[in-house]
Amino acid sequence: MSYATIVLESAAGVARITLNRPERLNAVTAEMHVELRDALARVRAAPDTRVLVLAGAGRGFCAGQDLSERALQPGAPPLDLGAAIERDYKPLVLTLRSLPFPVIGAVQGVAAGAGANIALACDVVVAARSASFIQAFVRIGLMPDCGGTWVLPRLVGRARALGLTLLGEALSAEQAQEWGLIWRCVADTELAGVVEELAARLARAPTASLARIKQAINSSGECALEQQLDVERDLQRELGYTQDFREGVAAFLEKRAPHFLGR
Ligand code: LHQ
């Protein structure tokens, strides 16, 4: 399948979507949204997908909304930004969070505006040391979207969430790791290798287990303890019926590496 603004590849259980407008730091256009929707639907439907890597081509991850699509001629009527969020950004974030397999965000260079929060919608974010995360919205008179106001206080607390969003300053990958905003910051030269290794490892893991771990961690944001214990009970019950659970226990008892078949 070929697209104009993204690249979709898939091999050995690992799907990879690369935002591909490097000359614009992979800023997101309406066309990119259409292509992303199509690619994500394909990746979700493909029975062999076990992990998705989301990356950017060139020197950046994503500079957020392409602002050339938002420029207004003098006298032109105002834009309804809420409509774009409802049509494009909200479904994108909800899709990334609900895919039944892990999504790895591979961040090199800048992740700004919606680009930063699309990265944070991934399940495991690995960033190159030279990468940075910028809640750039305030610089152009907007506020964070793509779930930024939901995820930031949960990940880094109110003080840091407010500092990042009110000031719109760049946060280095190293600081992002220290604050618990991302999983790992690695040397620039190691990013590709670390992501590949992580993806291959997750692709060998028991997929039903990964899907339910993601589901339970996602639901914990909205649940009281008792409700969450119920969620864990129900999902664990499902996992107890899987072939991969049988294999995991058998492999442990036989002192050998498990061979998980996945979904
Ligand atoms: C760009 C962009 C860009 C177009 C770099 N657009 N061309 C908004 C509205 C509607 C609905 C829903 O949600 C949203 C959410 C948002 O995402 S709002 C936030 C939008 N993003 C930004 O405000 C970030 C704008 N970009 C920047 O501040 C800088 O480019 C950063 C700090 C990301 C990187 O700076 P540099 O490394 O110095 O690169 P650069 O500025 O030279 O950019 C390289 C090229 O990419 C340049 O084009 P040129 O023709 O001069 O080489 C930029 O114009 C272009 N570009 N971001 N968002």
Image: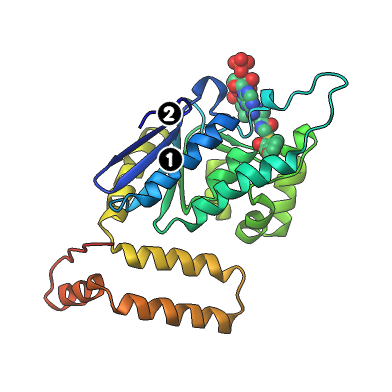
Give the residue number, with chain letter if any, for mark 1. 39
Residue 259 position (above or below residue 246) = above
Q: Quadrant of residue 258?
A: bottom left
Q: Quadrant of residue 136?
A: top right
Measure the C-alpha gap from mark 1 to mark 2. 9 Å
Is disc 2 surrounded by few (<14), some (14 to 19) or many (20+) residues within 10 Å?
some
Give the residue number, with chain letter if any, for mark 2. 3
What amino acid is found at the position of numbered circle 1 in the picture? Ala
User: Would residue 169 be found to the left or right of residue 242 on screen?
Assistant: right
Q: Disc 1 on helix, strand or loop?
A: helix
Label 1 beta carbon less than 8 Å to ligand 1: no
Q: Nearer the viewer, residue 158 or 120?
A: 120
Q: How are the colours assigned in the image?
A: rainbow
Residue 121 position (above or below residue 205) = above
Q: Position of residue 92 (x, y in %)?
A: 55, 46
Q: Nearer the viewer, residue 53 or 183?
A: 53
Q: Earlier in the sequence, mark 1 or mark 2?
A: 2
What amino acid is found at the position of numbered circle 2 in the picture? Tyr
Q: Report whether residue 136 is seen.
A: no
Q: Position of residue 89 (x, y in %)?
A: 61, 44
Q: Quadrant of ligand 1?
A: top right
Q: Disc 2 on helix, strand or loop?
A: loop
Q: Is label 1 in contact with label 2 (beta carbons under 8 Å)? A: yes
Q: Nearer the viewer, residue 17 or 152?
A: 17
In percent of the image, x 72 and y 45: which residue is there? 165
Figure disc tally: 2
User: Would residue 212 be found to the left or right of residue 112 on screen?
Assistant: left
Q: Position of residue 2 (x, y in %)?
A: 38, 28
In percent of the image, x 63 and y 28: which residue is there? 66
